[in-house]
Amino acid sequence: ALTSEIRAAEACTAVALAGAGPLGLVHVGVRRRRDSRSTRRGPSAHRELRIYMRVRVRVAQLLLLPLLLIALPLLLWRRAPAEATVASSVVAIEISGAARGRSSLAATAAALGSHVMQPAAGRGFTVLVWLEDAPSEAFLESAFGRTPTLTRLRAQSQLPPDLSTPTDALLAAAGLPEALGRVERNTLRMLRKMAGCEWLRRHAEAERAFPSATLVLRTRPDLLLTAPLPLPPTLPASASAVYAPWHCASAGLAFDQLL
């Protein structure tokens, strides 16, 4: 009975000292072999073993507690900067316009990935797509992979009344004058789809589905970047600015296909 009681106590001690490292377990093993021979010497060996095990458990507790108190703040300190960087610098890429086929969409998505996202890997990115072409929107959503993407198709059931009607149907019912040329009509299409994309972004951020963007990049589904595009620095929350690749103040013109 005494031998079985000693073995049970030794098993509990081995489990309690598992966090003390291999050295502690080796010592327990050595003591185990010694006391297995000393069980024949009577109750004094049993008392000695219990005292020894209590001391070892107490030492292990005293050693582990300071280590945990030191390690926990270090882990929190190492994690905090990365989370703050992602949360404080998010770029929303808004893609609106007319789709020109899957090959064009694939090239546009690949160029944005290699020339915008990869060079600015320290920032977070979200993608908003408004093409009013369900297969093309679904294709772009898959092309961006793990980047959070929201399309008009995906949010169709939540659109407000003024955006739920397709652009072409809205223009046809508007009774626009015949003198309005093709360029002017295309401009109206472009502006409405840009407004739709901006609604997607604000809706996703309001619903906390996407983090709030500190920079919005507007582009087209058929615009191909051929070189890295340096992104402007993050502005303070109280500041705002519009960056355009080309602007002519005297003529009142600006390149609006990439903003």
Image (cartoon, helix red, strand yellow):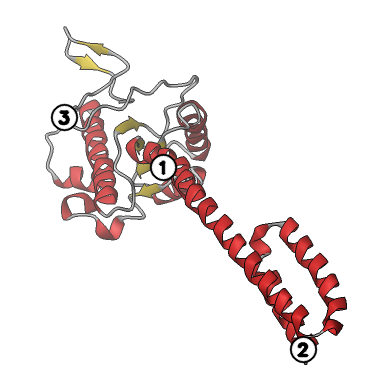
Q: Residue furthest bottom?
A: 1
Q: Nearer the viewer, mark 3 or mark 2?
A: 2
239 on left or right of 30: left
For mark 3, what is the residue? Answer: 180
Q: Looking at the rendering, which quadrant does residue 125 occupy? A: top left
Q: CA distance from mark 3 to mark 2?
A: 104 Å
Comes first in the chain, label 3 or label 1: 1
Q: Nearer the viewer, mark 3 or mark 1?
A: 1
Disc 2 residue type? Leu
Residue 96 in view in this figure: no
Disc 1 residue type? Ala
What is the number of the mark on residue 237?
none
What is the number of the mark on residue 80?
1
Q: Nearer the viewer, mark 1 or mark 2?
A: 2
SS at mark 2 in the image: helix
- At x 33% / y 50%, what residue is drawn? 152
125 on left or right of 183: right
Residue 228 in view in this figure: yes
- At x 21% / y 49%, what residue is drawn? 163
Within 10 Å of disc 3 (Cα), the crowding (few <14, some 14-19, many 20+) is few
Within 10 Å of disc 1 (Cα), the crowding (few <14, some 14-19, many 20+) is few
SS at mark 1 in the image: helix
Which part of the image, by quadrant, shows the C terminus?
top left
For mark 2, what is the residue? Answer: 2
Up/down of 156 relative to 13, above or below: above
